[in-house]
Image (tube, helix red, strand yellow):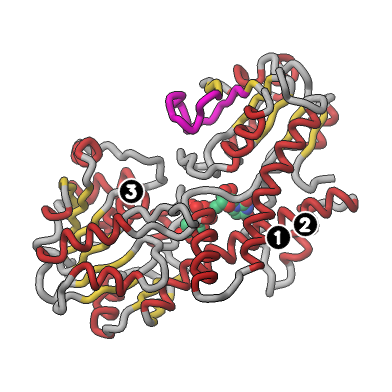
Amino acid sequence: MGQKIAVIGTGYVGLTTGACLSHLGHDVVCADVVPEKVDALNRGEIPILEAGLDELVHAGVAAGLLSFVLGAENAVGDAEFVFLCLPTPQGADGAADLSFIKSAAAHVGPLLRPGSIVINKSTVPVGSAGEVAKKLERDDVSVVSNPEFLREGTAVDDFLHPDRVVIGSDDEDAARRVADLYAKLPGEVLITDPASAETIKYASNAFLATKISFVNAMAAVCEEVGADVSDVVKGMGLDQRIGNKFLVPGPGWGGSCFPKDSHALVRIAENSGYQFGLLRSVIAVNEEQFGRVANKITRFAGGSVEGKTVAVWGLTFKARTDDMRDSPAINIINRLLEVGATVRAYDPAVDDSDDPRLAGVEIVGDPYEAVTGADVLAVLTEWPEFAELDFAKVGDLIGTKAVVDGRNLLDGAALKAAGFAYDGIGRR
Ligand code: UDX
């Protein structure tokens, strides 16, 4: 039988969690503090681009298993399980800012049903389960850490087909009850203490970021020694201890998780007396990568971008999302704007030229318009459709036939044969 669940926060994590839990047959009420967002959700409008989410939300609402309310106080009264899916932004010192989580806990504490369970789903610093428990001020409510491992763009699929479900609690019964919510899903359930569960999340994201920084650093080496990073990765990946996943070179990693979580883990380690030099280097290599791509663009623009027009394809931090949070594309664009470039950009998921992150960038609705008269084209997000565009047409429209392929997405050999100057990442 389905359980009564409240989900506090309807961002990427909360909305996906709520919709997927209703899909599993639970009775879910999602709460947010933004009235327009709740109204839109109640009208069936999904605010984010996330494959399969529309269908699950509509089905959940139609089945009477999913609803949206304004204010956590209107969601938690009946709930056996309360999921906290609130932002934990990066604070000034790099540590995650827990204030949204803490104030929500203080707010709902007096309203919770006896015996209910509060679940931290957001990525929270080690020790947060205890902090939440303190704010709840309830001896009869357990707090469980149950980190999410959802990738944007494939969040629904990741939720429904997890590699693992991690549950951290000092209360074995509460941990089992949370595990039962996921009983229909594949993947191993790992029950551990709260600190270990919280650490698993940070360690996983930091390790993945390390893989990408490693391959980006190797790409730089490949460029120097005349090797091809794609073949190098293929060769490495055949060793089953290494594998070939998450080793795609690019313009650096970004998004809402890796930057924030890697800085937070550096801070967590430092606060406990360990200087995490390796992770600091991983972050430094990433910054370096933004600069390397900006330099490639500058080189192709004739040594300076001042007064030059750079066409950019791709603004989101990766393909299949409309999210530009900590996007490498934005970082690279800002480097170019700072030294006097004109940037004209196209992204299939971005049409909001009023977004403050795009200040100074001309946003156009067509990839060919972006390249018209430009001095160089930079591909910064791996939208597959970019590879299908008509490059003869691009060649006719662009001012200088020069392409920096920050995602190794295009057929470099074909472009060179068509008279383009072409440079990718670690490609021969
Ligand atoms: C990530 C984690 O994968 C997920 O488990 C966690 O819960 C949240 O953070 P997400 O931020 O959606 O998910 O993006 P992800 O697909 O992991 O990519 C992160 C960044 O790394 C992107 O900028 C992406 O372009 C880059 N990346 C990823 C690479 O450059 N190369 C790769 O091989 C993989």
Q: Give the secondary structure at mark 3.
A: loop
From the viewer's side, name the closer residue of 308 and 312. Answer: 308
For the residue carrying disc 1, how many other residues have a C-alpha within 10 Å: few (<14), some (14-19), or many (20+)?
some
- Amino acid type, label 3: Gly
Q: Which mark is residue 218?
A: 2
Q: Is residue 45 left or right of residue 1?
A: right
- Amino acid type, label 2: Met
> Is there CB contact under 8 Å for labels 1 and 2?
yes
Which percent across, then down, holds residue 204?
A: 53, 67
Q: CA distance from mark 3 to mark 2?
A: 35 Å
Whether residue 20 is visible: no
Which percent across, then down, holds residue 159?
A: 39, 60
Residue at the spot 59% in from the left edge and 38% down from the top edge: 329
From the viewer's side, name the closer residue of 309 and 304. Answer: 304
Q: Which is the main secondary structure of the residues drawn in magenta? A: loop
Q: Is residue 87 left or right of residue 233?
A: left
Instruction: In the rendered view, tell whether residue 411 sits above or below residue 289.
Output: above
Q: Give the secondary structure at mark 2.
A: helix
Q: Which residues are magenta?
A: 343-360
Q: Which mark is residue 214?
A: 1
